Amino acid sequence: MTDAAGLRFDRLSITLGRNRLVTLDGHVAPGDVLTVMGPSGSGKSTLLSVISGTAAAVFQVRGGIHLDGRDITGLAPEARRVGILFQDELLFPHLSVGGNLAFGLPPSVAGRRERRRRVEAALAEVNLAGFANRDPATLSGGQQVRVALMRMLLSEPRALLLDEPFPRLDAGLRDRIRQAVLDRARTRRLPVVLVTHDAADARAAGGRIHHLDPHEAGTDLRPSPRTGDPA
Amino acid sequence: MSDDTVRTRAAPTARGRPRPGALAWAPALTLGLMLGPVAAGLAGTVAPALGWLPALGGDHLGTDAFEALRAWPGFPRAAALSLFTGLGATLTSLAAVTLICAGWQGTRVFHAIERGLSPLLSVPHAAAAFGLAFLIAPSGWLARAASPWATGWERPPDLLILQDPNGLALIAGLVVKEIPFLLLMTLAALGQVPSARSRTVARALGYGPVAAWVKTVFPRVYPQIRLPIYAVLAYSMSAVDTAIILGPNTPPTLAVQVVRWMNDPDLQLRFQAAAGAVTQLALLAGALGLWRAGERLAAGLGRRWIERGGRGRSAAATRVLGGGAAAATAGALGAGIAGLAVWSVAGVWRFPQATPDALTWRSWERYGPRLADPGAETFILAGAATGLALALALACLEAEQRYGVRSAGRALWLVYLPLLVPQVAFLAGLQMLALAAGLDPNRGAVILTHLVFVLPYVFLSLADPFRAWDRRYAAVAAALGAGPDRVFWTVRLPMLVRPVLTAAALGFAVSVGLYLPTLLVGAGRVQTLTTEAVALASGGDRRVIGVYALAQTAAVLLPFALAGAVPRVLWRRRRGLRDD
């Protein structure tokens, strides 16, 4: 593994007005997980939106983000190849399950037949074979998560962001789905950034943990990034 | 839509954001197309009012036009009528909407009212006025229903109900159209304040439901519907089509008299007309000042009333009044349209019979073919204006979202501006500008004028659902490799099909209903269903009026029906999009 592979934060700092929300420096190797923990309002989601390129213009971003040696800081979101899973599955309600997956599949996969085959294979991989023509709104929570996961993986991302994932699944299902996501990230050698306030998520991820301090409005708080072993 | 949006073009682009392209010009272009004609028209009105219109020999500045206006014997009464009918219609509409919401919000009746609102809102002013006239006239349905058994009338009584000198029928005609509009605006505002929670809290403190609403919800809703109320006031003071049909004649309201002068073969009367249009503007300014003073007074008194802590337990009276207002509005519009329909197929129909002796298609056979040309013109104008408005509004909203700039709330009045200026005040000027420039009236100019009125409605109707759309869908699509254009066309627009079509139907309805813009800018040469229908008012032939007004109503209801049906068919297999 070269040093360039994976996701590297080069003294990244995000500020809003006079508040510094996040500072991050370091490297997430392919297949590794960086867990970012902090209470709500501490800038976790902002960090993810900065990495994926969808942050609002009001946030000032300094430093750089490199993915597999490429500086992606100034790139448009669609050019970054950073996959993201939100709390909600956000399946496009106007498309079928298969349509959602095909939306993720890059246009370089040409030909209706081949695209269809890839979609079917992706569904089969998560035990949803034959679901291509279903309305996503008719799927159970666990099924929707799996579709969202495969949609993201089909787009061939080179890094994976998880934003407090799967909050609505019951505990047992949640463990299984989380494991499935992390396993796939590992086998595809994707660096993963997981933000959560749930210690169980952090334990399961098993990587480094970065704590964000809550900031209070109007005060300039020093961030104290700590790196530690998973509990 | 705001000047903020325009300014960001120069602002440095944040990292990772696309550099603003042509789309960033959309807000400026939209504002220009919306406000340019208003500004030009006002200038074109003020100049001749001050004596300047070289094309008609006006080459020195002076107050002759205003003196001629003052010399017209009907002037004081016409001006007073405008003030009285405008303020009366606005106050009545606001009171009715307040009663409806205070009495019924959160009930099943309220949901029923909500659902019935769109079709009522879309009925053109002229058709509503004709329908009301057919109901309340001495020989109208109401009199027939009660005669002769209750009234003893064997022939229509000699009462001046329509076109009464005090403008009461005019106020009624305005109110039945303004209640649905204000109610829709209030519903949107109710969604932006925690109305249900406030009410629950107040009721837990022992307040009756109506007192809870008026004391905790209304003070926060009012600022949000202030601009729509001002628009209602501006419209009611200067409405021409409703006033021609229901308003007094000798003298008419000032706006109607201005239009008469504008259409007079004696071109010298244009100066007087311009002075009248400027006066109309001044009257509105005065009425707005009066209204604002009333707002302050009411706020002060209201605060004391709220602090006294009266619990006002019973809701019964408010419910009855509010329900009555809603029922009367829906009934007047519904029964009015039904009256138009019955008259259009009526054979012999003597007073006091409640129904015609026989039904016949004769009126449709006779006048139907004549509907073709104005009907086609109506659809061309409305289609073009709505298409343009939709494209511009979508471009503005997309630019706002793409470049991360919110249209500032304080710029909202710019969107409302075309609705806050009396139509006659700038449309008269547009006609005189065309006259001065030697331009022939043409369809393109009428379309651009329609756009001025269609754009605000389309934008306002589209903005909330567009902004409320969950932007994480865009983030997901971008993370999947979709650029902003692909996100717009394949994710956002399909998900927003329903509000887009609703906005289109609303824009179409606005355009179909426009009377004065078509009449003045088209200089009488662009004929639509609406201009033709209003022109029939003086003839008083109820069968032909029924045919035209019904055709006008159909031209409006059809797009609304389509806007409801298309998403239902399109998304019949998509539960996530079925009910928004």
Image (tube, rainbow, N blue to C red):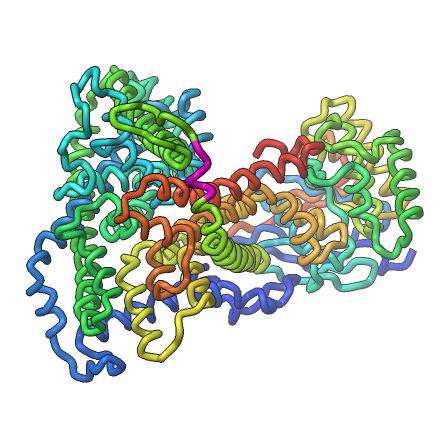
Which residue occupies the foreground of this view, B539 or A123?
A: B539
From the top left corner, tell me how far across and down residue B413 is, in percent. Answer: 35, 55
Q: Quadrant of the N terminus of chain A?
A: bottom right
**B363 drawn magenta:** yes
Magenta-drawn segment: B360-365
From the top left corner, tell me how far across and down residue A177 is, in percent. Answer: 80, 30
From the top left corner, tell me how far across and down residue B576 is, in percent. Answer: 66, 33
Name the image quarter holding residue B285: bottom left
In the image: residue B149, left or right of residue B502: left
Residue at 90% from the left image edge and 59% from the top image edge: A2
Residue at 90% from the left image edge and 54% from the top image edge: A110
Q: Is residue B327 above or below residue B71?
A: above
From the top left corner, tell me how far across and down residue A166 is, in percent. Answer: 71, 32
**B182 drawn magenta:** no
Which residue occupies the foreground of this view, B503 or A136?
A: B503
Q: Quadrant of the C terminus of chain A?
A: top right
Which residue occupies the foreground of this view, A16 or A103?
A: A103
Residue at 27% from the left image edge and 40% from the top image edge: B173
Q: Is residue A55 visible?
A: yes
In the image: residue A129, left or right of residue A56: right
Name the image quarter holding residue B121: top left
In the image: residue B224, left or right of residue A69: left
Residue at 46% from the left image edge and 62% from the top image edge: B447
Majority secondary structure of magenta residues: helix
